[in-house]
Image (spheres, rainbow, N blue to C red):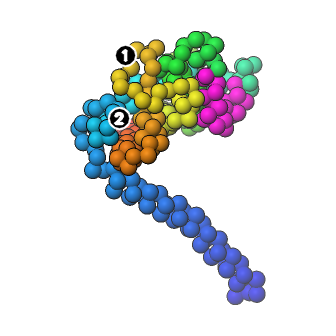
Amino acid sequence: MTQGARPRRRSERAFLFLAVAAVVIPLACLVLLLADVLQVGLGRIDLSFFTSFPSRKAELAGILPGLVGSVYLVLLTAAVALPLGIGAAIYLEEYGSGARLAPLIEVNVANLAGVPSIIYGLLGLGVFVRALELGRSLISGALTMALLVLPMVVVVSREALRTVPHSLREASLALGATRWQTIRRVVLPSAYPAILTGVILAISRAFGETAPLVVIGALTYVTFVPDGVDAPFTVLPIQIFNWVSRPQESFLVNAAAGIVVLLVTMLLLNATAVYLRERLQKAR
């Protein structure tokens, strides 16, 4: 072994130790937190917890308005963000080479991807709640969350479109298909698994966000479910925040149970994304 080989090996081992520690320590903290939450809140979860409204009595309180509001919010967010995000990705990848607006859109998408979520809340408050006079309603929250997840949808969709070989496009065009027919019948079906995975991950982020909705005025104590897009609303993370802010120990148990429901829902969304990606890729 040469004279300089031993210091290099020691440096490699030290770096390997630091890398492993950087993975193990956060995972251990996460496991401890999850274990504590499960221990406190798992016993509180029953059917009445899902079907009851919030109450000043912790033992009677439930998550029905927050859960229904989260589902409505996610559906409206997807209805707004997915067509815009996938359409923008198609425009940038398939038509952007000769388009004047493409560089401007790319710069804006890159900038928006790094903006903190609370800034989207301020934007939603100024534009949707006040300027457009939509009020502190479900549609204002959905439009705000659509802006939040839109950059992620665009980036993921573009990456998926780039994985489609150019030879498939050229073969389709050589057979007489138009560019739009090529995109619709060749490119999108090939990129569909990756797009779907990214879309589900973006929607799962919207499901767990709190800061933008607090800024636009989502309610913290709701004893009803939204009956329209213009109705006031709350979501599950805000309901959890409301319980955590109360001094009674019994409400902290409710908050832990709500956290368990939120984590399980997000894990199911992420697992669904992985399963569909693997299933669709095998079917191709």
The residue positioned 50% from the left and 23% from the top of the image is 142
Residue 175 drawn above or below residue 133: below
Identify the mark nearer the N-term, 2 or 1: 2
Q: Is residue 64 left or right of residue 202?
A: left
Picture coordinates of residue 214, whole percent (x, y): 54, 31
Report the span colored magenta.
105-125
Between residues 280 and 186, which one lies in front from this camera angle?
Answer: 280
Residue furthest out toward the left:
47
Question: Crowding at label 1, few (<14), some or many (≥20) Cα neighbours within 10 Å?
Answer: few
Q: Is residue 258 magenta?
A: no
Q: Is residue 89 left or right of residue 230?
A: right
Which quadrant does the N terminus fall into?
bottom right
Evaluate whether residue 22 shows in this view.
yes
Question: Crowding at label 2, few (<14), some or many (≥20) Cα neighbours within 10 Å?
Answer: few
The residue positioned 54% from the left and 13% from the top of the image is 134
Between residues 4 and 80, which one lies in front from this camera angle?
Answer: 80
Evaluate whether residue 79 shows in this view.
no
Picture coordinates of residue 242, whole percent (x, y): 45, 37
Q: Count the marks: how many?
A: 2
* Amino acid type, label 2: Arg
Disc 1 element = loop
Q: Which residue position is annotated with label 2?
A: 56
Q: CA distance from mark 2 to mark 1?
A: 23 Å
Q: Is residue 65 left or right of residue 135?
A: left
By secondary structure, the bulk of the magenta-drawn segment is best described as helix
* Amino acid type, label 1: Asp
**Quadrant of the image occupied by residue 224:** top left
Q: Which residue position is annotated with label 1?
A: 227
Contact, mark 2 vs mark 1 (Cβ under 8 Å) = no
